[in-house]
Amino acid sequence: MLGKARVAPLKQTTIPRLELTAAVLAVKVDRMLKRELCIQLNSSCFWTDSQTVLRYISNDTKRFHTFVANRVAAIREATNVFQWRYISSKSNPADEASRGLSADSFMSCKRWINGPDFLRRPEQEWPEPFEPQPVCSEDPEVKRDILINAIDIQPHDATTKFVHYFSSWAKLKISVAWLLKLKDILLSMSTKRKELMAMGPSVDASIAPRRIEEEMRKNRAAICKQVLTVKDISKAEVAIVCYSQHASFKEEIKDLQRGASVVKNTSDIYRLDPVLHQGLLRVGGRLSRSVLPEEQKHPLILSKDQHVSKLILRDLHQQLGHAGRNHMLSALRERYWITCANSACRKILSECVVCRRHRGQPAEQKMADMPQERVCPEFPPFTNVGVDYFGPIEVKRGRVMVKRYGVIFTCMASRAIHLEVAHSLTTDSCINAIRRFVCRRGPVRQMRSDNGTNFIGAERELREALAAIDHTKIHQALLLKEIDWIFNTPAASHHGGVWERLIRMVKRVLLSVLHQQTLDDESFQTILCEVEAILNDRPITKVSDDVNDLEALTPNHILLLKGNPTVAPGAFQESDVYLRKRWRQVQYLSDLFWKRWTKEYLPLLQERQKWSRPRRSFAVDDIVVVVDRSAPRGSWILGRVTNTYPDKHVLVRAVQLKTQTGQLERPISKIFLLQEAN
């Protein structure tokens, strides 16, 4: 036998909650007994004298508040509903613990030790199972049902659907003109038939029907030859405007028809002092005494939310040769006055495909976070490297001039550079340059470069030759040395800005040194070493005018102290400088460089100098224009986005395109949006 009871909390709690807590305690005791006893037990049976608890446990329709919901969930997770049965309070031995007994009464009480008498009888003689009633909606533990009504208003008016069907103002006017003309034709034919039938009694009854049909056939033949006139188009335009005004300014028209001189001051057109002229709402305004034409003094009023207004603005935009907003507004107000026309014109301009094609700017996106290899100081210099080519530079070999190319390797963290000479743009020459670099600067873990033909500032000859380099062969050669080669997105020169900026500095120093002089191979190699030394001595932190400040940090602070490119084997202190162990002096100075690098250089990379706001990311099936600065804008090709490459912030920075010539991969800075996917 095992009994367990708990003291009720000081905080006032309802009886059903206490009963439910006791039920959870019973479940925990049952779980503990099954876990501790090494006996195969049958299904447990739980007894409670609370009908409310039984209703809570058997409930499947109502939702409870958190206290009851959590405890009912714990009970339902460990037991089944049919395991719970009802026992009257008189037979419940748990009351001995909850209500308390004196010592004498407890010694004489057999119910606590033996339990109810019916437990010794067969299960068929136990009390009948209690069928709990559904939980009442008024129970304080039941969550109240919240009803939310949503009304979806769709235009069921046939005229509205007809107007929205058209995307051209001219086609809408022509269609409405034909409908009005058809209406007039049907009315005239009905009148003609009535006139012929009225003349019927004066003619023989057998001849009258044939004569009427013959006359109607002639009338139809004459009608079928009719064409639209300018007057028909004008009538159609008036009918369309009248319908649109009644849809948007119904209350204002009613007020003016009742004889009111002004509309309510809550109306959107209150400041226009509208007037009703021949059933049409026009601007009253203050220019009635001007010499302008009547239509321009009192233009027709339309709402910018109307589909008709969009059609008029779009048609006007095309007629003006895709002019700007002010030109559109000037021409619009010669006949129409559209509310909030300024914003409506901006929207039309932003949606115009032709304007996007001829005036669109390359896409932008919020500047990405710095890659890990640029902000982590735990690796030695030149562990993560960016590589690029520059040149060609002509040198003299014997009596002939040959071309040589420079290969720049830059450390992604310390911004140090290493220059090598490539005798050609072949794959083997590239591999040899990389191997010389690795032998002199130590092992490289990761190498980044542009992808083929996107070398900014390089000559045409360089771009064409680099496209022929076998990147696969280079990659396989580097795998043997455990170097991971990463290629940037094609045409994404700004992805390699960390080395493109250094190439510009190298060229500037070379130009100042060479002065149009002719060099041989040995001199060219020497000059590259000089340039390398100059650029590695450039400051990468701010230079202070205060003589008491430390000197600016330069890449040479770490390069000239680098002996073996391995991680420092221990912690080093300032006192190590005065020891005879030179290697500890070198390691201390190296640690000093990285501490200054972390405190002085790294915070300079924190701010975003541009591209500070996130923009709309490109989506699959967007129609875009591929930017090609070497060709006229009119010849730029169209493409459809087939795949996107988002970063960890779900901002797309590169896309895959399908064009008429094949598949392309481009950064978003080399495309601009022409038409959204939806």
Image: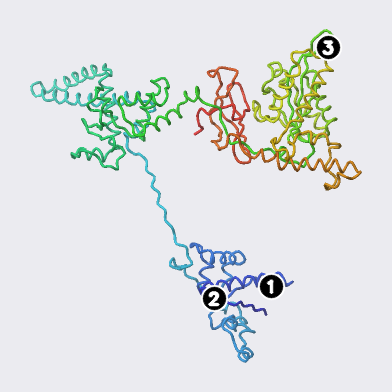
- Residue occupied by mark 2: 86
Q: Secondary structure at mark 2?
A: strand
- Residue occupied by mark 3: 397
Residue 515 on image: x %, y %: 74, 15
Q: CA distance from mark 1 to mark 2?
A: 22 Å
Q: Does 193 appear above or below 378?
A: above
In the rendered view, does 3 fall on the left or right side of 63? right
Q: Amino acid at mark 3?
A: Arg
In the rendered view, does 582 fall on the left or right side of 396? right
Foreground residue among 441 and 428: 441
- Residue occupied by mark 1: 33
Mark 3 vs mark 1: give the one in front: 3
Foreground residue among 25 and 388: 388
Using the image, tell me which numbered label, if any, was put on residue 195: none
Label tally: 3
Q: Are marks 3 and 1 in contact (CB under 8 Å)?
A: no
Residue drawn at point x = 71 percent, y = 69 percent: 35
How would you rate the neighbour count of disc 2 (Cα within 10 Å): few for under 14, some for 14-19, many for 20 or more?
A: many
Q: Amino acid at mark 2?
A: Tyr
Residue farthest to the front? 547
The picture quadrant where one finds residue 662 is: top right
In the rendered view, does 244 fall on the left or right side of 458? left
Residue drawn at point x = 79 percent, y = 29 percent: 476
